[in-house]
Image: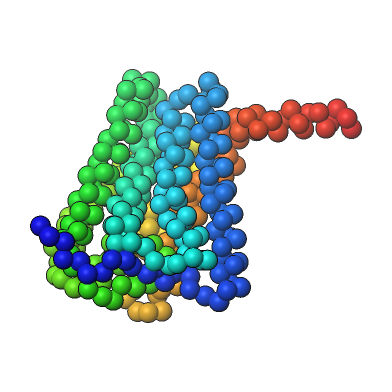
Amino acid sequence: MENQTTVTYFVLLGFSYSPPVQMFLFCTFSLIYAVTLMGNMLIMAAIRSNNHLHSPMYFFLSHLSFIDICFSTVTLPKLLLNFYASKKISYGGCIAQVFFIFLTGTTEAFVLGAMAYDRYTAICKPMYYVKMMNSAVCRSLVGSAWTISCLFALTNALPLLKLVFCGPNTIQHFSCELPSLLALSCTETSQNTMTFFISSSIVAAPSLVILVSYIHIIATVLKMNSAEAKRKTFSTCSSHLIIVVLFFGTGCFRHMRPSSASSLIVDDFFSIQYSISTPMLNPIIYSLNTRAVREATQKLIGCKPLMAHVMQKC
């Protein structure tokens, strides 16, 4: 089928402010991206180098860190380029960005679901934990997450190639997202919208797994007699629960935005939170809330030996 598209590029108008403000935003997002890369790579290296962290919980955390690097890389480099270079993005580049946003975002949702199932098994089914969460099962869960997410991304990105874009070509956002592109199409998009909503039901699967898992976890914890046991059990879930709220909560608000023009700033805020800030915050949250991860990262960068040397000098 011949490509009828007349628009060869789109213009991303997100964060189109005065030069001083753009300079501030450029520095801020550069710092966020640097922290995201260093923090998540540090988590991955710490888990890989520490034999005590070779368990399902940290296996999933390592993959979550890898996905966070991919997720932020889909949008941040282009966003940084937009501040001081052309805000244009090619037609093919925009379609590719839609695909990779779907791929990495959906994979993160499924990995978070797998982590919730892991915590449910460890707390509610401790006698069967080793059997239910063996290495083969963990690898299958991660592999399935990538496979399903790829199919979901292809299902929604490929039909965009059939649409005709004849102008305007300006996107009031800092990245290409499906709703933004559908709004610019000169042809009927009801089929694309229906495909998106039908296929989005698969994204509800990890949400349901997380919800059911935590209902069982809370019920199990409330039955414990020891307050200390309750505290320790909840502490193993706190980091994951914070990340789930940040990712799913802001993601839902982003896609339930009002249609008024005054919501554009709110759109940008929630998009920044779930697609840019959350990948940066994940390693920080796990490092602060999980003692094993914190000690492994300190050991990897030599913080403890350094502190011990300073104390000896003093």
Name which residue lies at 42% across and 45% down.
Answer: 70
Q: Is residue 93 left or right of residue 290?
A: left
Q: Is residue 115 left or right of residue 16?
A: left
- Number of labels in the image equals 0
Place of residue 248 in the rendered image (x, y in percent of width and height, measured from the top left): 38, 53
Indicate whether 71 appears above or below 20.
above
Name which residue lies at 54% across and 31% down.
Answer: 45
Can residue 178 be seen at all in this image of the molecule? yes
Q: Quadrant of the N terminus?
A: bottom left
Name which residue lies at 42% across and 36% down.
Answer: 63
Place of residue 168 in the rendered image (x, y in percent of width and height, measured from the top left): 28, 76
Indicate whether 280 appears above or below 185.
above
Name which residue lies at 44% across and 50% down.
Answer: 73
Q: Is residue 221 left or right of residue 195?
A: right
The image quarter in which residue 190 lies: bottom left
Indicate whether 26 appears above or below 168.
above
